[in-house]
Amino acid sequence: MHYELYYWPGIQGRGEFIRLALEEAGADYADMARSNTGMTTMMEFLEGERTLHPPFAPPFLKAGEQVIAQTANILLFLGPKLALAPQDEAARLWTHQLQLTIADLVGEAHDTHHPIAGGLYYREQKPEALRRAADFTEARLPKFLDYFESVIGRNPHGDTWMTGDALTYADLSMFQVIEGLRYAFPRTMKNLERVYPRLVALHDRVAARKKIKAYLNSKRRLPFSNDDVFRHYKELDVV
Amino acid sequence: MHYELYYWPGIQGRGEFIRLALEEAGADYADMARSNTGMTTMMEFLEGERTLHPPFAPPFLKAGEQVIAQTANILLFLGPKLALAPQDEAARLWTHQLQLTIADLVGEAHDTHHPIAGGLYYREQKPEALRRAADFTEARLPKFLDYFESVIGRNPHGDTWMTGDALTYADLSMFQVIEGLRYAFPRTMKNLERVYPRLVALHDRVAARKKIKAYLNSKRRLPFSNDDVFRHYKELDVV
């Protein structure tokens, strides 16, 4: 199967969770928004009246005639096809549940720099961002990381992966979240990571995988930036 | 199958999306947090080390030995069992995609009164709430409602339901969102609803269903309140 991934050009964003899955699996895919006509096609899907199942927002994936949106939903679809999800139905739901909780964390990380409106610049909501980021680094982020650390710790197959005895898309996404958090909040993460050895080991295990390593060293991997979901503003990274 | 629903007592919250599905299907379920020992049991699931698949937060559902969290994930699980999801795999993913987009809208509606931190009171973040609510009612809410109105409009089976030719859990959730928005933003909604006839008709169609009607008139349906996800503060309801 050939896959077409549609996402905003120039950033990792939520598209990166899909890219990592496609790259790890060595899937045949095109990153459409990077092509000359990709953005036009993407906007047609978003604004056109012809799409049967219109996406509310990117990323979305085209697989044959099927158009699928919502990051976690795309991974739910791709997981079994790319051998990045467990076979068992209950375990698949659990993997999806982890992905949805990762999505919640990503949303909260985004809102540290955009607590008022996505349509405004950061500088237009900086006082609010300072307050929200302080709560995020102090309360919310440790709560999420405690949770994910304990999830790895209670995996009955050992503490190698988040679930089961093999890598899933949730592990790839967890890697990306740690990368993003390190970029956005380097001081906070340096401080926090000491108490999350399993998450750090999981991150390193994903980074060392042959295909992921090749991807991260390729031009296909876009750099982090302050146009992205994870942004580094020194004043928001308060320990 | 007997289901146990775990959620904070006294509010509709995100648990309501699950309750509506269980009620419409006439399912055998217990709303655990309303029982004497329910809260204790719920906290054991959230804080205990014994749960194999621990929820990050309520609501969660116990079905036999399976514990499932994340509202949309619970509905993904329940949908086929309660005959509230399409048979076809692609249509099920589409229904789930709609549910995830509804969840995004619910999250944004919540953040109008809590833009800084869930751990602070509304009065401690009121200036920020005024700014965020203005953006929500002006920009975000119409964008979401435009989208859902167009989804109903392009359903090839006619504009009765959001997808297919039968009621799904996404329709029940859409009903609940409109109820919640009317409670929280009565002036805004009065103004907006004129341009969303399909959403209003869908809402009424759900409200008129025999089992839903009985549920809404029962004591099991908790009232809306300002301890809930949808809250009414007059100053946030600006047209």
Image (cartoon, coloured by chain):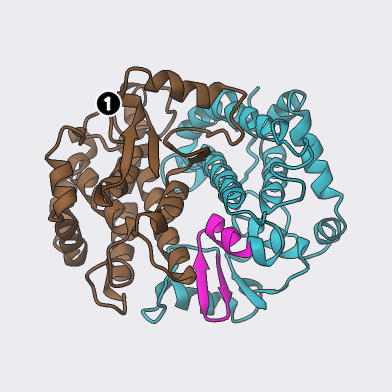
Chain colours: A brown, B cyan
Magenta span includes B74: yes
Left or right: A205, with B206 as reference point = left
In this rendering, does residue B23 appear at all? yes
Task: Please state which of residues A105 and B36 is positioned toward the viewer in this rendering.
Answer: A105
Task: Please state which of residues A65 and B239 is positioned toward the viewer in this rendering.
Answer: A65
Q: Position of residue B79 (x, y in %)?
A: 64, 60
Residue type for callout 1: Gly
Quarter the N terminus of chain B occupies: bottom right
Q: Number of marks in the image?
A: 1
Q: Quadrant of residue B239?
A: top right
Residue drawn at point x = 75 percent, y = 42 percent: B161
Q: Position of residue B209 (x, y in %)?
A: 85, 53
Left or right: A113, with A75 as reference point = left
Task: Please state which of residues A101 and B78 is positioned toward the viewer in this rendering.
Answer: B78
Q: Quadrant of residue A79?
A: bottom left
Q: Secondary structure at mark 1?
A: loop
Q: Which residue is mark 1?
A: A10
Left or right: B13, with A170 as reference point = right
Left or right: B220, with A190 as reference point = right
* Residues drawn in magenta: B60-78
Q: Position of residue A185 (x, y in %)?
A: 20, 43
Magenta span includes B201: no
Q: Position of residue A155 (x, y in %)?
A: 31, 75
Q: Chain of mark 1?
A: A
Residue drawn at point x = 66 percent, y = 67 percent: B81
